[in-house]
Image: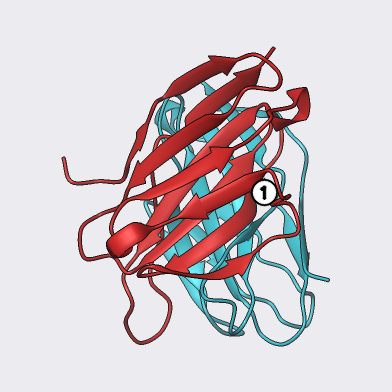
């Protein structure tokens, strides 16, 4: 299966700890997105990469959040000093660049629980 | 700002019934519109899309028409199956936004035999 993969699938941590999530997009997809989804809500946009460049960050992405995409392949999302309000499903999606809109392919998500 | 509003669920209906899920949006310019579906235990999948006014997206028996005058993109299916039980999300992508998506809250659909 060459879809978008995310690791870990589940993460339980204590408040104040740092966590890091990884996303491996579909190979050759230039665009990579991170979203956050809380229970009963739709996903909310966090940040966007085109190749290795982070081109947009949502105001939802506080200073405790940082994302990288070295070499334009996999991406990591780190949350420092986690808070209970960070508990959510973190989704990654990728798409190719071509004329017009391109379908975003979503990974299965990483569910974060902050105790 | 941009927003998407869709009808609350759960929507429960019998197999072979007609399904409509309402979706309205606010946006500047002409966004692209989408329906995504999340089956139990699976990730989000694109169901259908429309990129300009009066376009009709269709897939797997589902249809939705981009209505600029009513800022709506209602999802319909004429005869649902148990396998259509899922959560359905309406979403928009603003013009010039790198393709980022803004989602509604989702509507859970439960189809009973």
| Relative side of A69 to A40, left or right | left
Q: Looking at the rendering, in which quadrant would you find the N terminus of chain B? A: bottom right
Tell me, yes or no, if residue B15 can be seen here. Answer: no
Which residue is the site of mark 1?
A: B21
Residue in the foreground of this view, choosing between B60 and B108: B108
| Relative side of A51 to B78, left or right | left
The image quadrant that residue B54 belongs to is bottom right
Chain appearing in red on the rendered image: A
The image quadrant that residue A45 belongs to is bottom right
Residue in the foreground of this view, choosing between A99 and A16: A16
The image quadrant that residue A88 belongs to is top right
Chain appearing in cyan on the rendered image: B
Residue in the foreground of this view, choosing between B32 and A110: A110
Residue A74, image x, y percentages: 31, 51
Residue in the foreground of this view, choosing between A85 and A96: A85
- The extreme right residue here reads B1
Q: Is residue B73 above or below residue B94?
A: above
Tag 1 subunit: B
| Relative side of A9 to B22, left or right | left
Residue at x 54%, y 40% (from the top left corner):
A78
- The extreme left residue here reads A1
Q: Is residue A96 above or below residue B42?
A: below
Residue A107, image x, y percentages: 38, 42
Residue at x 63%, y 46% (from the top left corner):
A65
Residue at x 48%, y 34% (from the top left corner):
A20
Q: Secondary structure at mark 1?
A: strand
Residue B81, image x, y percentages: 44, 32
Q: Is residue A12 above or below residue B26?
A: above
Q: Residues within 10 Å of mark 1 (few under 14, many from 20)?
A: many
Residue at x 61%, y 85% (from the top left corner):
B53
Residue B100, image x, y percentages: 56, 66
């Amino acid at each position: 299966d060459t879809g978008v993969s995310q690791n870990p699938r589940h993460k339980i941590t204590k408040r104040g700890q740092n966590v890091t999530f990884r996303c491996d997009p579909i190979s050759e997809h230039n665009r990579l997105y991170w979203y956050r989804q809380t229970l009963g809500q739709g996903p909310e946009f966090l940040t966007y990469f085109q190749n290795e460049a982070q081109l947009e960050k949502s105001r939802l992405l506080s200073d405790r959040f940082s994302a990288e995409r070295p070499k334009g392949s996999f991406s990591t999302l780190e949350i420092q000093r986690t808070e209970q309000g960070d508990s959510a499903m973190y989704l990654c999606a990728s798409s190719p660049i071509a004329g017009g809109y391109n379908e975003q392919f979503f990974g299965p998500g990483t569910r974060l629980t902050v105790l | 700002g941009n927003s998407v509003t869709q009808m609350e669920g759960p929507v429960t209906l019998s197999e072979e019934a007609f399904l409509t899920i309402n979706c309205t949006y606010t946006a500047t310019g002409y966004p692209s519109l989408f329906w995504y579906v999340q089956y139990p235990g699976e990730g989000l999948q694109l169901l259908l899309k429309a990129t300009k006014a009066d376009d009709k997206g269709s897939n797997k028996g589902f249809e939705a028409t981009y209505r600029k005058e009513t800022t709506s993109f209602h999802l319909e299916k004429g005869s649902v199956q148990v396998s259509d039980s899922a959560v359905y999300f309406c979403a928009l992508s603003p013009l010039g936004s790198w393709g980022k998506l803004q989602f509604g809250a989702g509507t859970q659909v439960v189809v009973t035999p």
